[in-house]
Amino acid sequence: MILQDCTMEEFTEYLKNTKTIVFPFGTIEEHGSHLPLSTDTLIIEEAVHLAEKERDFFLAPPIHYGVCTSTGKHPGTIRITAETLRRLTLDLVRDAYSKGLRNILLISGHGGSLHMEAIKEAAEIVADELDDIRIAVVSPYDTLYRELSSLCETKNDAHAGELETSMMLVISPSLVKGRAKEEYPQFPKPFIVSDKVKYWPGGVWGNPEKATSEKGWRAIKIITDKIIELIDRFGQVEGF
């Protein structure tokens, strides 16, 4: 059930079938010179929509903004703080719970470490507050790293490269504006620098020229199957 499309009566009736809701998280973030700023959102939105056709759950509208550190100063990126994301997640989950939802899947198309930590921290808080809640936090790029990496010819593909470009070729090929060149950030680790654009001018981490729609279909299926697996597990696990 697409949450924003249903009436309150339909919500109440569908709640008899399922107490599961999925919140997709994305970003408005640079993805090189060839992919749209909404790439993270579009990819995870596609996967959860495909899963919704296979299983009963409420699918919430995506959260379009996230925590972006490495890309924060690149053109087009509009970011929020970890504190804002944490508070937003807390509010959404608490209110969903108050409406009778008990199984909460927070799934992010953006895998940034501070971004994911903010969502996980919110989940930890509500897991302690609410005895009968079941809550899971997932980024495909963490949970499915081996499976997704195996599709790539490029080693260390991570951002706006082979994998994400392949998926966007499937989801919305008209939004793929050619191919950016292969690139990797040159941050002077372990130092934290403010001007990250200086060390990563193109905003690509991988090789978009290796992208194909076939790889994209396979990647989207891997992510969709994982979502379905997690939805099924809500009925099997006595709490996290």
Image: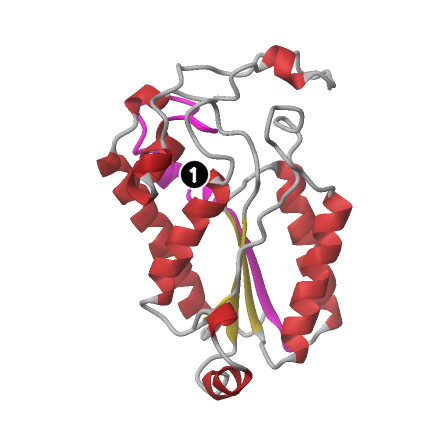
Label 1 residue SS: helix
Judge whether residue 136 is colored magenta. Answer: yes
Q: Quadrant of residue 235?
A: bottom left
Are there few (<14), some (14-19), or many (20+) residues within 10 Å of tag 1?
Answer: few
Q: Tell me which amino acid carries mark 1.
A: Tyr
Q: Position of residue 212 (x, y in %)?
A: 25, 31
Horizontally, residue 135 falls left or right of residue 206, namely: right
Q: Is residue 10 visible?
A: yes
Q: Residue at x 46, y 83 (%)?
A: 14
What quarter of the picture does the C terminus occupy? bottom right
Provide residue 216's location: percent of width, then percent of height. Answer: 29, 39
Vertical placement of residue 175 versus 14, above or below: above
Q: Is residue 187 visible?
A: no
- Residue 24 drawn at (x, y percent): 52, 55
- The magenta segment is 132-161
Report which residue position mark 1 lands on.
Answer: 145
Q: Is residue 58 above or below residue 184?
A: below
Q: Residue 166: which quarter of the image?
A: top left
Which one is in front, 187 or 49?
49
Q: Residue at x 48, y 29 (%)?
A: 159
Task: Say which quarter of the image contains residue 28.
Answer: top right
- Is 89 displayed left or right of 175 in the figure? right
Q: Residue at x 51, y 69 (%)?
A: 4
Q: Residue at x 46, y 34 (%)?
A: 36
**Quick check: 140 above or below 157?**
below
